[in-house]
Image (cartoon, rainbow, N blue to C red):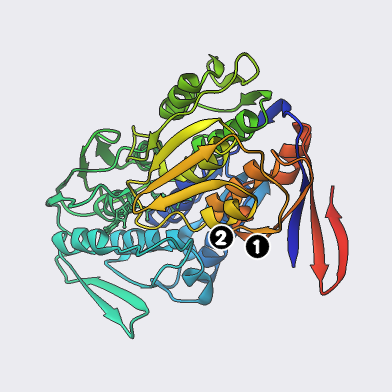
């Protein structure tokens, strides 16, 4: 087993280069199934979720090769199955994109129910509603596999109104509809940057998707798609995480390979707190040393609101800021499991339904803590970096699902963090 050992209490300082966006990559990789030729995808993060989805495509017959650390070559022309039911599929939430891609390409799909981070009920009813509106029949087999099939007609474009703003349902319906007959209109669509990225990717392959980034997306189905080379967008949540860590340690860092526009809601909160942010085309300087930070409230919302995927990291930062801050988690029902871990470190937080009330300003103390999910794990790092003492973070496999080279990147910013292997009472350093 592996854990992170962090000796905190020092301001972060230096430069960090952000990797490609996880939540764009895990949709764009299966989207290649729709294509009739090989594709090359650049700026792919080297994270375990990408490795997993690549292996799943390989099991289905696709050729997937890492040309270099951030470029994947995917040849979907040898896919021999529209069924993806292995344990690997159950291991990741985003495997639901296989449903839309396989259904769009082959008119049928058999995919195991997704796993991934566990914070409350994570239904996919809106995905299924979309597929059914396009003419597919869906059924749950043995409580574990979703089957979707359409008759000889194939998928036929239609109007779909999403009852909840769902990133996954919006992207999944885009995938299926891009090779359906005629026009599909998705109303009340999600507007995240990765939705625009998926639309750009599909359009580069020859699809006709318009309106991505607004709440009405129109997809006119096409009968063929050609191979392309495409570079995915930078990860706004990874950037937000480094911003939280820099603020929590009152540091000053430069963040490169980003799109500052995608970070607007996060940057606005930091400015409200007193952080100085200087933006460039693809970089920013984040300076939390200019004045004492002020408490703030945040409410998570679908894009362009404050992203839920930055909520745990931001809460871990707010613990260090004197005064009462209130966090309102408005996207997921139960994304506060990590708070009991912060409380083990001495944080004063109470949770009332969707609200977390943080009495900040009391320094945290060292304690062994656990990453309860991906962003919760990132929050543990933000907390540990504040502590003058040694914090051990276990279950780091969650963190590695979504953060490339997290140890190396934090070390380059001056953090004292290392990954160690442990079994029973022995412990051995794994990587600098
Ligand atoms: N929802 C439904 N029915 C559905 C789909 C969603 O009721 O059919 C509800 C959910 O229960 C939730 C809300 O709608 O309350 C939003 O869910 P959404 O579908 O937008 O989430 P998702 O697509 O499953 C993606 C990201 C998550 C991120 C959310 C919200 C991926 C693989 N995952 O999940 O990312 O929190 O959008 O932005 O893209 C993460 O990266 O840490 C992460 C969890």
| Position of residue 319 in the picture relative to residue 431 (left or right) | left
Classed neighbour count for the residue bearing mark 2: other residues with Cα under 10 Å, few (<14), some (14–19), many (≥20): many
Who is closer to the viewer here, 81 or 49? 49
361 or 100: nearer the viewer: 361
From this viewpoint, which residue is outermost toward the left? Answer: 159
Q: Is 394 above or below relative to 66?
A: below
Q: SS for tag 2? A: loop
**Label 2 to label 1, Cα distance in Å?**
7 Å
Task: Identify the residue at horizontal 33%, vertical 86% (top origin).
Answer: 142
Point out residue 311 in the picture as x, y percentages from the top left corner: 46, 43
Between residue 429 and residue 247, name the one nearer to us: 247
**Residue 155 in the image, given as x and y percentages of width and height:** 19, 60
Q: Which residue does the image show at 33% across and 82% down from the upper left? A: 143
Name the residue at 62% across, 26% down: 255
> Which residue has dot 1 on it?
395
Mark 2 lies on residue: 372
Residue 139 in view: yes
Above or below for 39 versus 82: above
Q: Is residue 230 visible?
A: no
The answer to whether the residues at label 2 and label 1 have Cβ atoms under 8 Å apart is yes
Q: Is disc 1 placed on a helix, strand or loop?
A: loop
Residue 280 in which image quadrant? top right
């Amino acid at each position: 087993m592996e854990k992170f050992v962090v000796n905190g209490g020092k301001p972060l300082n230096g430069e960090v280069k952000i990797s490609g966006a996880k939540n764009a990559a895990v949709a764009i990789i299966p989207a290649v199934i729709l294509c009739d030729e090989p594709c090359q995808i650049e700026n792919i993060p080297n994270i375990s979720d990408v490795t997993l989805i690549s292996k799943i495509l390989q099991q289905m017959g696709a050729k997937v090769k890492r040309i270099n650390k951030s470029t994947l070559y995917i040849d979907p022309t040898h896919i021999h199955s529209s069924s993806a039911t292995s344990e690997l599929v159950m291991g990741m939430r985003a495997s639901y994109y296989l449903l839309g891609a396989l259904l769009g390409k082959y008119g049928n799909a058999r995919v195991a129910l997704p796993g991934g981070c566990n914070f409350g009920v994570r239904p996919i009813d809106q995905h299924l509603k979309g597929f059914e509106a396009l003419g597919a029949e869906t059924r749950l087999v043995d409580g574990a596999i979703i089957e979707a099939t359409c008759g000889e007609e194939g998928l036929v474009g239609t109007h779909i109104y999403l009852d909840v703003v769902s990133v996954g349902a919006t992207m999944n319906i885009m995938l299926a509809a891009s090779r359906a007959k005629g026009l599909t209109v998705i109303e009340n669509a999600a507007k995240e940057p990765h939705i625009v990225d998926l639309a750009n990717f599909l359009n580069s392959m020859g699809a006709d998707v318009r309106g991505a980034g607004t709440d009405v997306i129109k997809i006119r189905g096409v009968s063929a798609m050609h191979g392309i080379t495409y570079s995915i967008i930078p990860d706004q949540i990874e950037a937000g995480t480094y911003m939280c860590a820099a603020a929590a340690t009152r540091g000053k860092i430069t963040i490169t390979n980003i799109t500052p526009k995608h970070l607007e809601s996060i940057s606005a909160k930091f400015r409200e707190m007193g952080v100085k942010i200087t933006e460039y085309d693809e970089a920013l300087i984040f300076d939390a040393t200019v004045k004492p930070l002020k408490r703030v409230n945040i409410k998570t919302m679908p894009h362009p609101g404050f992203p839920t995927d930055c909520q745990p990291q931001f809460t871990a930062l707010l613990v260090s800021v004197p005064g009462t801050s209130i966090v309102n988690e408005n996207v997921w029902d139960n994304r506060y499991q990590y708070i009991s871990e912060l409380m083990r470190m001495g944080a004063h937080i109470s949770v009332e339904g969707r609200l977390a009330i943080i009495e900040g300003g009391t320094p945290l103390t060292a304690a062994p803590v656990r990453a309860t999910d991906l962003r919760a794990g990132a929050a543990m790092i933000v907390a540990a970096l504040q502590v003058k003492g040694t914090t051990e973070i276990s279950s780091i496999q969650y963190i590695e699902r979504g953060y490339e080279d997290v140890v190396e990147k934090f070390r380059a910013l001056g953090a004292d963090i290392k990954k160690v292997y442990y079994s029973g009472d022995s412990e051995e350093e794994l990587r600098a």
